[in-house]
Image (tube, rainbow, N blue to C red):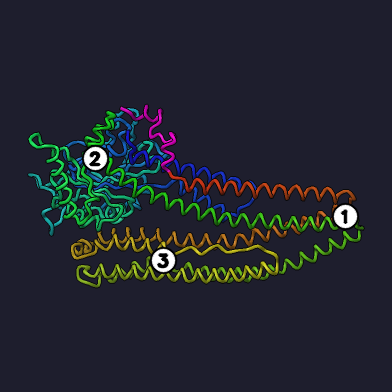
Amino acid sequence: MASSFASSLDALGLWRAGLGRRLDEFGHFLGEHDLADPAAAEALDTLRRGLVNEKLVVAFVAEFSRGKSELINAIFFADTGRRVLPATPGRTTMCPVELGHDGEEAPALALLPIATRLEGLSLADLRSQPRAWTHIPLDVTHPERLSESLQEVMRTQWVSVDEARALGFWHDDNTEDNPPVDDTGRVEVPAWRHAMINYPHPLLKRGLVVLDTPGLNAIGAEPELTLSLLPSAHAMVFILGADTGVTKSDLTIWRDHLGSPTTSSFVVLNKIDALRDPLATAAQVADQIETQRNNTARTLGVAPEKVFPLSARQALAARVDGETAALAESRVLDLEAALGAQLLPQRRDVLQTTVVDAVMRTEALVSRRLGDRRRQLAEQLLELRGLRGKSGAKTRLMIERVDAETREFEQCTARLQAMRMVHSRMLKNALIDLTSDRLREEVTEMQTAMHATLLNLGAKKAFIALCSRLRELLEATQTRGNEIHTMLTASFAKLNAEFGFSLSVNQMPDMNRFVQELALIQRNYVQYLGLTQALRLSQTKFMEQFRRMLMSKLRVVFENASGELELWNKMASSQVDSQLRERRRGFRRRREALERIQAASGELEHRLSELEAQDAQLQQQVARCADLIGKLKEHAHLDPATFGESGHGQLVDTESRIAIQA
């Protein structure tokens, strides 16, 4: 079978797993030989956990009956030999569905009741409240039972028009998109607000998260979907019907919710098999498909190369039956190639840069620590070799000199205390603009500005002003951080020169990355603050939910910025503590060795042998450290595709096939 996006994703997962093992090995070596201070060890552990828990989110967006679930099955789950997601004619997915895997939890379907919208709590808040969800265990060993359980995402309920309006499914100002009313005056709405499927599929274990979204009515009713989940996806696949082209509701979704196309947006024209005509030649059908493709690209304002005509049903059947020719005819491989070419290398490059940068910072720290230890050993060896053939009086003089050096060195404590006080004050000033309280004040100011205009018509202007103020806070933090870097660099240089330290300062974290994240939030949110959303923003519940979601997104940016700045300062100050401890330990060992030599004539040669053995061990540690770092960097620069080619990247192992195959 031809290489698929699924196999490429599996290879990327294997690359990440191997990199995680290399980090584990490196971290264990550093801990075993006390070569990393707590801050550096914490940074490496955070990096390793982030690498292992890395998620790749691919969102599928479409109106109902576009074959969205069938396409998900064809791309990701054909290796199971069956449909994982329900894909039947008519409307299937009634609420947003996240399909992923959490190894600490049993396979289950978690459903959030639609009534939680009335409480004003965001989805992010409710994720941490298990009691708010309905949990249905999934029996992955019985395909029929599994399929029956997943049918629950299709369930609906009937409510009054007033209830539908409160839930966000009925709009008096836009009656065309309202659901039909039955004879009793009731409206059919989804029973669930959100669904999460914890499913032990090999690709999901590799970190894939599939976001399956419902049609326009549900998308418009759930702000969190459009303001948080979709913008957070690494790729979005927008699915249309090849037989219908771009309908009015499709165009509404594209313009109002997907925004301008980006490199991570893909448009699919599904069901090209429906265009086949027994009275038309194959060339005529191909021309019709190409015409529909060009028309779709022109309507959506994208390049024709971003539109992929295919047949998801044919692709799934071909993969299940192992028919290579039919798979190529389905044209799904073109979409997979585009996903693999644009999405996976981008994620790999981001992870590679993060890992290599962190390892290089740790390498510099370890090199300084090993170099300092070897320097101290060399000084002791030189000192003790000078005692050969000398009298006891010479030894006493050496002890007195060690005591004098110790007293002289301890004078650095006053300097260190003064530096720490200045450092603490500067760090506090740098972090003050990144606190949750400051962020809450700025969001409150935005709300006040919004309410000052009729029907919140100034919402867009107020939001842009908020983003501008937040950007200034991040830039001010960068300036203060650079001032800390300048102060520490100057202080460390003096301490190194006067007291023999080997202190250095890593580069200040770049706040520009968080400025870019803020710009992305601004770009994703600003399209929902125009005139068309003014009426909804004037609703108290909607505005409160919007504020909660915005605070949640901004808090992540500011907490990450604050965390990186604090960790950088902690690493800078912790090396002072570790080197201070090492130097004091060195003075103590020198004095103890001289006292033993004074008491026993044969102790000198024995101590010299000990120090020479310790130096040999340090040389071995230097070589071992260099070897581990070299292997880590080498693995980080490997092409993940080689993992798939090596035969180790099997998508479904034997045990998994027994568990999930029909």
The magenta stretch spans which residues?
640-662
First-in-chain label (2 vs 1)? 2
What secondary structure is found at the residue carrying circle 2? loop
**Residue 480, image x and y in percent?**
49, 71
As displayed, is residue 169 above or below residue 506?
above
Q: CA distance from mark 2 to mark 1?
A: 84 Å
How busy is the neighbourhood of tag 2: few (under 14 within 10 Å), some, or many (20 plus)?
A: some
Please tell me which residue lies in front, 164 or 123: 123
Q: Specify the amino acid type for callout 3.
A: Asp
- Look at mark 1 in the image and give the residue it sits on: 388
Judging from the image, what secondary structure is the residue with disc 1 in? Answer: loop
The quadrant of the image that shows the N terminus is: top left
Disc 3 or 2, which lies upstream in sequence? Answer: 2
Marking on residue 601: none
Q: Position of residue 552 (x, y in %)?
A: 36, 58
Question: Circle 3 sits on which residue?
Answer: 437
Q: Amino acid at mark 2?
A: Arg
Closer to viewer: mark 2 or mark 1: 2
The dot on residue 331 is 2
Q: Residue at x 63, y 52 (%)?
A: 35
**Residue 505: percent from the left, percent from the top?**
57, 64
- The image quadrant that residue 153 belongs to is top left
Question: Where residue 187 sits: x, y (%)?
Answer: 14, 47
**In the image, what residue type sits under mark 1?**
Arg
Q: Is residue 144 visible?
A: no
Residue 457 drawn in magenta:
no
Q: Residues within 10 Å of mark 1 (few under 14, many from 20)?
A: few
Q: Name the mark nearer the viewer: 3 or 2.
A: 2
